């Protein structure tokens, strides 16, 4: 399974080999042994989530406090989404930068995001079905959100789709507000945490 590092340290794109014939398809959508050499540790799996969204639904930008954080491995099994990672680690060389990839039912790629990296996605089709593995269980007391339409993030959301946000995400702070409030993860703390996972 080819593993491609992206511009933000701690993000990777996986392109599975799809085996198909007149009966259908088979693929390995996740391989721990392909991911571990890149991360320097195995991805601990604590939770598996499934999200089904109508076209235009925009979820995020979400992240969990580090430590412990929550790494994610995301794929789209029906329809298509624009999946986005935002480097929220204060002090990172790519702080505030985003990485956007299209995940869909044709290519069936997987997107890995390390702890401390914000995650968001927009459904590009109706019934867009996203499944993702998480390294830690959801803990609402350690969860955070940024406004996904904050111009400072420069996320390339499609111009032809009206975004639909949850009340929580619509009322979320901007990147500057979250940084001023001390809510963002620290890059050095994240690096130390990653090393402890090795």
Image: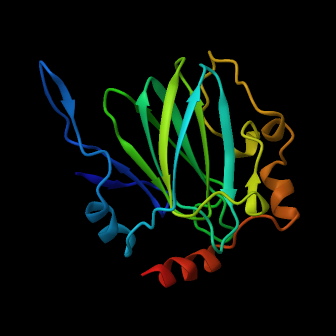
Please tell me which residue lies in front, 111 or 187: 111
Point 38% across, 70% down: residue: 42
Residue 179 location (% of width, % of height): 81, 62
Point 68% across, 46% down: residue: 61
Point 54% across, 22% down: residue: 124
Which residue is farthest left? Answer: 21
Residue 39 location (% of width, % of height): 39, 70
Please tell me which residue lies in front, 116 or 143: 143
Question: In the drawing, does residue 21 fall left or right of residue 107?
Answer: left
Residue 133 location (% of width, % of height): 47, 52
Question: In the drawing, does residue 126 fall left or right of residue 7?
Answer: right
Residue 24 vertical placement versus 13 (above, below):
above
Residue 173 vertical placement versus 141 (above, below):
above
In which quarter of the view is residue 152 placed?
Answer: top right
Question: In the drawing, does residue 8 fall left or right of residue 179?
Answer: left
Quarter in which the C terminus is drawn: bottom left
Q: How many marks?
A: 0
Point 82% across, 58% down: residue: 178
Residue 103 vertical placement versus 133 (above, below):
above
In which quarter of the view is residue 165 placed?
Answer: top right
Query: By what rule are the colours in the image chosen?
Result: rainbow
Residue 194 location (% of width, % of height): 51, 76
In which quarter of the view is residue 20 placed?
Answer: top left
Residue 92 vertical placement versus 128 (above, below):
below
Question: In the drawing, does residue 150 fall left or right of residue 39?
Answer: right
């Amino acid at each position: 399974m080819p593993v491609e590092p992206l511009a933000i340290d701690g993000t990777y794109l996986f392109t599975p080999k799809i085996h198909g014939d007149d009966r259908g398809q088979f693929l390995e959508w996740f391989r721990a042994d392909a991911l571990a050499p890149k991360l320097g540790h195995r991805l601990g799996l604590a939770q598996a989530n499934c999200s089904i969204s109508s076209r235009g639904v925009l979820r995020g930008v979400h992240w969990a406090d580090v430590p412990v954080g929550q790494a994610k491995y995301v794929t789209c099994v029906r329809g298509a989404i624009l999946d986005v990672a935002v480097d929220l680690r204060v002090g990172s060389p790519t702080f505030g930068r985003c990485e956007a990839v299209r995940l869909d039912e044709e290519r069936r790629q997987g997107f890995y995001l390390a702890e401390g990296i914000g995650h968001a996605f927009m459904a590009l089709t109706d019934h867009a079905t996203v499944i993702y593995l998480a390294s830690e269980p959801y803990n609402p007391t350690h969860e955070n959100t940024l406004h996904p339409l904050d111009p400072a993030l420069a996320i390339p959301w499609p111009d032809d789709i009206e975004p639909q946000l949850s009340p929580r995400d619509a009322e979320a702070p901007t990147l500057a507000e979250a940084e001023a409030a001390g809510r963002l993860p620290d890059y050095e703390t994240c690096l130390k945490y990653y090393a402890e996972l090795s």
